Amino acid sequence: MSVDTYKMMRQSSAAFPSGIFQGALQSAAAHRAGRSRLALLAGCHTGLGAALGFSVVTNVMALAVPLYSIQVYDRVMASGSVETLVYLTLITIAALVFLGTLEIVRGRILQRIGVWLEQRLSMECLRRTLTMPPGTDSYGTQALRDVTQLRQTIGSPVVTALLDVARAHLDFQSSP
C-alpha cells in the first residue's frame, strides 16, 4: 500500500467515523498494487520464457546418458563394433557439454532476472523507507533485505529445480 493511499484512508476514516469507505479504498489500493506486480512480472517474461525454454532443452539433453547406455547394450555388445562405441561416446560427450552450457546459460538468465527485479523493487522500498516518519518500525529495512533474499532465491538452484519438475515426473514414470 502506498503512502498516499494510506494517507487517503486515514483522512477518509477521520471524515467518516464509521469507516464506510475504508474497505473500498483498501480494495482500490490492492488492485493498483496487483497491476504493478503484473507489470513487474511482464517486464521479465522474456527472460522467464527463455529460462523455461532452456529447461525443456536441458531436460531432453539429460536423456543422453540413458540413451547411450541403451545403445551400447543393444548395438555395441551385440555387434562388438568399436567404431560404433567411439561414435556413440563422442555424441554423448558432445550432448553432455551442450547440457552443461545450457545449465550455465539458464543460471545466468535467472541471475539477471533476479538482479533486474531487485533494482526495480529496491528503489520502491528505499523510497518508502525514506518517507517513513522517524521512530516507526523498521519494516523498510526488512523490505530491502527481503528484496535481496528474493534476488538470491531466483538465482539459486531452487528455481532451476522447479523448472525441472517435468523431467522428474518422467523419471518416476519410467522407473520399474
Image (spheres, rainbow, N blue to C red):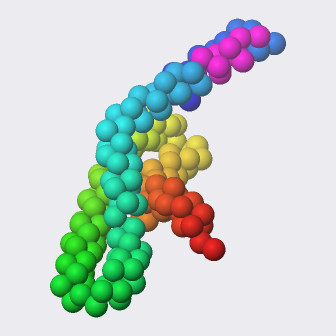
Q: Is 21 part of what is drawn in magenta?
A: yes
Quarter the C terminus occupies = bottom right
- Residue occupying the point 22% across, 81% down: 84
Position of 93 with respect to 2 (left or right) is left
Query: Which quadrant holds residue 116?
Result: top left
- Residue occupying the point 39% across, 80% down: 74
Position of 26 with respect to 92 (left or right) is right
Task: Mark yes or no: residue 50 visible.
Answer: yes
Q: Position of residue 54 (x, y in %)?
A: 33, 53
Query: Which quadrant holds residue 102?
Result: bottom left
Q: Position of residue 129 (x, y in %)?
A: 46, 41
What are the residue bounds of the magenta stretch?
20-29
- Residue occupying the point 81% across, 12% down: 18
Name the one closer to the observer, 151 or 142: 151
Q: Is 110 part of what is drawn in magenta?
A: no
Query: Which quadrant holds residue 160?
Result: bottom left
Quarter the N terminus occupies = top right
Residue 110's place in the image compared with 62, above or below, is: above
Position of 142 with respect to 45 (left or right) is right
Name the one closer to the observer, 131 or 152: 152
